[in-house]
Amino acid sequence: MIQFKALLTKELKEAFRDKRAMMMAMMMAVMAPILIFAMSKVMIKEAVETPAIYLKMSGVEYAPKLIKALDDENILLFSNVPSDEKVIWDDRNLSLTIPESFNQDMLDGKTIDIYLSADYSEKANRSPVRRIKDTINDYARSIGYKRLLVRGIDVRLLQPIKIIEQDSSLPNSNAMIISMMLGLYLLMAAFMSGLPVAIDASAGERERNVLEMLLCQPVNTIKIVSAKLCCASLIACIGVLLTLSLTTFSVSFIDLTKIGASFSLDALTITALLLLLLPICFFASALQLFVAFQSKNFKEAQSMVSMIIMLPAMVPMIMLFVDDKPKWLDWLPIAGQSLIMEDLFKGLPVPWLLLTFTGLVTISMTVILVLLMAKKLRSEKVVLALS
């Protein structure tokens, strides 16, 4: 125990001595709340607000009521565009062409062709085009209803069945954007925060010949690996804790009531999240140490270990495209934690049994990695990076 304590103290001193590496380790914890706050603000604004759209129109004089309907939805003529936005809307080049026969075709009850021209591949045009189409379709539908009423036909005949939707989701479920982003960033923080420490404690020490001197001492290799793992995992846990606390704080400044949602984490949920992510911090650090020890030098270790960061991003993304998820996904590291976090953010009860089982599987895999590293450190090929 004394040897392990001395090794852990040595690893912690070396980790916290490198201020630049610590800043890089904590970057995810600081950047994640800012990104979640900014993206949530933008998405809520797009969902609830109707900013002005400036449309180049020809044949305005033929359909004054249609123009009035567009104007009511804040879809205005291009001639009204402010001078500071003129270049933007000129580049978007949204145009609407109303035929000269509009009035006569309307009287005759014919179908009128109105041409909407836009670059549909341009992301900035998607929302304006959708609003323009919805407004014109609503106007056309109202004309059709009036024609039926004039002929003495009840418009309710057009809708023999009406679906009354009853949303059974909890208020937290409506804040899915924040939930998905927070879950992803928490997993990323577990993998990224301990990354610089894991590389330096393995490939870095080997290049500085510190690892060789350490192995010459009468110390069990399991204690050496365990001390390095605990140090890197501690930094990863600090990163996760900062990400969770700062994000919870930043989300409190977002008015989610505009989209009929709410997002709050009580003490029980936060405790469950920390217990859920603690094994992942150890697993991520163990995996990074294992890969770094197999690398020939520090530069190769950086390249190889950086690829591991893709795991917490790829696994949840892949699961989004799987409708019927097999049960064994609930037990695997990363996948199991991601699914449980999704339920917790929805406000569902904490699945303690599943959380415990997933944690045990993750810890078991971590122990296996530690034993493999301890065995490999007894080989000169690994210690001296021999081919």
Image (tube, rainbow, N blue to C red):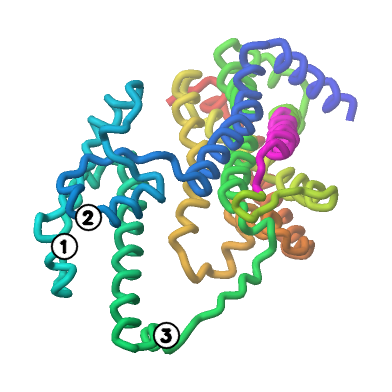
Badge 1 crowding class, 10 Å Cα cut-off, few under 14, some 14 to 19, many 20 or more, is some
Q: Nearer the viewer, residue 90 or 254?
A: 90
**Residue 225 appears in view:** no
The image quadrant where one finds the C terminus is top left
Magenta-colored span: 235-256
Q: Nearer the viewer, residue 378 or 71?
A: 71
Q: Position of residue 262 (x, y in %)?
A: 69, 52
Q: CA distance from mark 2 to mark 3?
A: 27 Å
| Residue mark closest to the camera, 2 vs 3 | 2
Disc 2 residue type? Answer: Ala
Disc 1 residue type? Answer: Asn
Q: Position of residue 365 (x, y in %)?
A: 65, 50
Is 354 in the magenta? no
Mark 1, residue position:
103
Q: CA distance from mark 2 to mark 1?
A: 7 Å
Q: Position of residue 240 (x, y in %)?
A: 70, 36
Disc 3 residue type? Answer: Arg
Give the residue displayed 34% in from the left and 88% down from the top: 153
Mark 2, residue position:
63
| Residue mark closest to the camera, 1 vs 3 | 1
Mark 3, residue position:
156
Element under disc 2: loop
N-term mark: 2 or 3: 2
Task: Verify CB contact (< 8 Å) between mark 2 and mark 1.
Answer: yes
Badge 2 crowding class, 10 Å Cα cut-off, few under 14, some 14 to 19, many 20 or more, is some
Element under disc 1: helix
